[in-house]
Structures are given as C-alpha cells and as structure tokens.
Amino acid sequence: MLGEFEYLLLSAAAKLGENAYGAAIRAETGKATGKMCSIGALYTTLDRLEAKGLIETWMGAATAQRGGRPKRMVRITAEGRQAAAGFYGAVMRASRGVSWETDRAGVTP
Amino acid sequence: MSRFCWWLADRVSLLLSTDERDAVRGDLAESGEGGSEAVVQVLGLAARRQAAGWKNWRPWCALLLATGMGLKLVRQSAPLIHLSSIYAWMYLANWRMADVGNSGFWRLMLHESGQILLSGLVLMVSALVAGIVIGMSVARRNALATGAVACVALTVTNVAYVPQNPVLGPAFIRALYAFLLLAAVVLLPAVCGLRFSTSLRSRFGHRLP
C-alpha cells in the first residue's frame, strides 16, 4: 500500500509525463496541496518509490534556466500506475458516505 | 547575505552524492528559492540522507569502534603528554650553553626525546590504522557524523585524563597543551586514515566488501 505523499508524487509524475523531474513534480504537488513540499521529502520519497520499482529515474539534460545543472527525470512504471490506481480506488471506497464526501457532492446525508 | 547563504548551501550540498547535488542545486535555481531557504532545503535533505544511513548496523559499529579506539588512544597518550611537557620544560627553562659541549647531556637528551618520539609515532600509526578501519566500515556520508561524535567523545575524555603535573599547572595551559598534542598524534592521523579509506572506497567501492 502506498503512502499519501507517495501517491501525490506518482500522480504528479503521471500528469507531467515526459516532463516529470524534481522541480516540476514539487511544483505540481504544491499546486495540488497548496503547500510546497521540502526537497528532502521529495528526493527521499522518489528513492523509496524507485526502490519499490514504482518509478524509474535517470539524470537528464542540463538547461541554462537551472544554471547548467542536470535534472533528475522520473518515469512512472506499470507497477507504479497499478499501485496508484489501487490507492485511488481504496481512498474512493473508504470515503464513500463520509460527511466531507457527501458535503462536497452537495448531498445532504 | 544571500551570497553567503548560497555559498553555505553549496558547502552543505557536498554531503550529497554528485548527481543528487547537481539535481538539487538545479531545482533550487529553477524554483527561484532565496539563499536562506536553499540552505534549509539542502540541510533538510542532507539530514534525511544521514538519518537513512544510520538505519544500517555498520555506522553504529563504526561509531562504537571509533569511540572505543579513540578512548584507548587518548588514555595511552596521557604518559606522552606528561613526559613531553616535563622534558620540554626541563630543557627549555634550564638551558645552559655550557651543556652543549657535554656528551652526556646529548646522550641523555637523545635517549629521552627518542622515547617520546617513539611513543608519539606508535600513537600516530595506531590512530592512522583506526581511521582506515573506521573509514572502511562506514559509508562516506556517515563518516563525517561518526568522526564528529568520536571527536566529542575524545575531547571529553581528554579533559578527564589530562595528567596533573607542576609544568602543566594552570587548567587552560594543561587543556591546550594536551589538545594540541592529541590533535597532532591522534586526530590528524585518524582523519588522514579516514580520508584515505573513503577515497579508496569511492575509487574501488565495487570491489571492496
């Protein structure tokens, strides 16, 4: 089972596709949660996801915008997609009928 | 201030692996973080990396080894501190030109200084070997923390074991003399040993156990 932060990173990586790398994933999770995660949390979690075989990472090309430094590129694996889908399904099932879910849908319990 | 913070962030990032260092510095540049925020971010990652390394038994074993060997070396260096301070005081405070022509004076001085140098050399070699052994048994990123903790233990023990003698009368002189001598015969060789073994590990790491 994934942790919620692992799920956030997998979702961001999936959304960014070919452009998924450290800073972009951090910005994407920041957009989703309203708060930027720390670089420490980001990179240690990416390592953990890679160790679990849920993502692949490699060093990409350097750009002038980054002061000529390379990016750590991220690609979500088939196992990663499966794990994220499983987590999403579990959260949806667990949330069914709870007050914040029904309130959000505009349904009075 | 910002320049200093970026310089500091660069220094701290040396604790990370080369690839990770480049990626993190690039991310910080791209996201337009301020200097102080960059220091916090890099420190946070370095701390997490350090903490992750300590989940393994090897750094704990190395720390135990470093502290044990260090304590032994500090205790063994007490007679050296004692003798060297007494003989240094004896020769410097009582120097007479008339003694220079005396063969007995030279024979005695060579004998005493030879003994002190020999015990100093034994300590240096022991510290060098200790540094190599510790460096071999711990990952590069944990070597710094292991060394720092061992140094604190050594300094505390040093204060406790500094010999009392009339030459090293005032507490400050005693502590300073002992520290300088320890730095020369224990700390410096140990750090050299540690650096040697970590550089060996980074060059031939895949072939070492």
Image (cartoon, coloured by chain):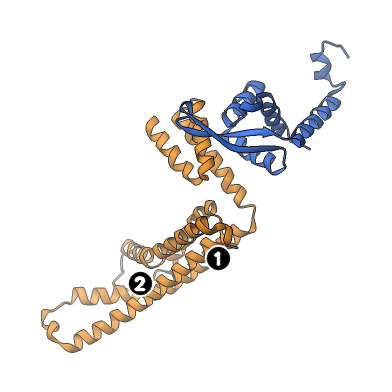
Chain colours: A blue, B orange
Label whose residue precedes the other's in the sequence (2 or 1) = 1
Specify whether B105 is left or right of A28.
Answer: left
Q: CA distance from mark 2 to mark 1?
A: 24 Å
In the image, what residue occupies the spot 19% across and 85% down?
B105
Q: Is residue B166 visible?
A: no
At label 2, which amino acid type do we have? Ile
User: How many dots with numbers?
Assistant: 2
Task: Report which residue position mark 1 lands on.
Answer: B65
Badge 1: residue crowd in 10 Å (few <14, some 14–19, many ≥20): some
Residue B169, compared with residue B19, is above or below; it is: below
Task: Report which residue position mark 2 lands on.
Answer: B81
Looking at the rendering, which quadrant does residue B122 occupy? bottom left
Q: Pick the quarter of the image with the C terminus of chain A.
A: top right
Specify whether B121 is left or right of A2.
Answer: left
Image x and y of residue A35, in percent: 61, 24
In the image, what residue occupies the spot 44% across and 68% down?
B127
Image x and y of residue B52, in percent: 62, 48
Looking at the rendering, which quadrant does residue B196 occupy? bottom left
Badge 2: residue crowd in 10 Å (few <14, some 14–19, many ≥20): many
Q: In which chain is the residue bearing label 1?
A: B
The reply to whether label 2 and label 1 mark residues of one chain is: yes
Image x and y of residue A69, in percent: 48, 34
